[in-house]
Amino acid sequence: MSIRSTISPLSTALLCCALLSSCATLSAPPSGAPVAAYRATLELGGRLSVNYSRDGKPESLSGKFNWTQTPQRVDVSLASPLGQIIAAISVTPGQATLTEAGKPPRTAADIDSLSAQALGWELPVSGLRDWLQGYATAADGSRFVASPVHDTVTTRDGWRLRYVSWQEEGGAPSRPKRIDVERLAGGQVDEMAIRIVIDEPAP
């Protein structure tokens, strides 16, 4: 699937700061396998696909991403399915910046505000720091740790996560491979379904 012409590079970039897809058959580790410990510093690469409905009209996009995080910063680059860089996003305490090719940078106090300004609705970028590693804050405020047995959670802000498959690393603790993310109506979007596939796990 490629990015449809009805979706701007800006929308694609902000949507990505969240998400990805694969048609490959993915395996899961034994049900008792532990999830890897949370890492404050992390590098990941992968693919995303997004399907959503706005004003009753279906929209879709896909792309590749690179995600780098430290305790004080998140950097995300988004490329087309063919590898052409579309945009880069940097998030630091107190500021989020979106840079598109040939355009001046756009900033806001945080990435949720930036996405709300650009798209009219907020994306769960801040939650991805946890979600990409198999962690989330559940609707009741408790800490959720994903596993092949406990693979589904609804977050405090209304996103439903399902950890579909896992990285197998020769007996090492499991890491998410594919994550499906869904949300019903919110803001200008009627519903949204996202798939994230991590191709390049952290060393």
Image: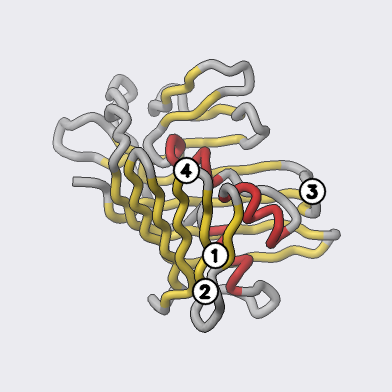
The residue tagged 2 is 100
Q: Locate residue 66 relative to residue 56 in the image: left or right.
A: left
| Label whose residue precedes the other's in the sequence (3 or 1) | 1
- The CA distance from mark 2 to mark 3 is 24 Å
Q: Residue furthest front?
A: 94
Say above or below: 41 vs 54: above
| Label whose residue precedes the other's in the sequence (1 or 2) | 1
Question: Which one is closest to the eye, mark 4 or mark 1?
Answer: 4
Q: What element does badge 3 sit on?
A: loop
Q: Residue at x 53, y 29 (%)?
A: 152
- The CA distance from mark 1 to mark 2 is 8 Å
| Label whose residue precedes the other's in the sequence (4 or 1) | 1
The residue tagged 3 is 187
Q: Are marks 3 and 1 in contact (CB under 8 Å)?
A: no
Give amino acid for label 1. Ala
Q: Nearer the viewer, residue 102 or 10?
A: 102
Q: Residue furthest left?
A: 170
Q: Position of residue 175 (x, y in %)?
A: 31, 37
Give amino acid for label 4. Pro
- Badge 4 density bin: few <14, some 14–19, many ≥20, Cα 10 Å: few
Q: Residue at x 42, y 23 (%)?
A: 145
- The CA distance from mark 4 to mark 2 is 21 Å
The residue tagged 4 is 93
Q: Residue at x 24, y 46 (%)?
A: 202
Identify the image quadrant of residue 64: bottom left
- The CA distance from mark 3 to mark 1 is 19 Å
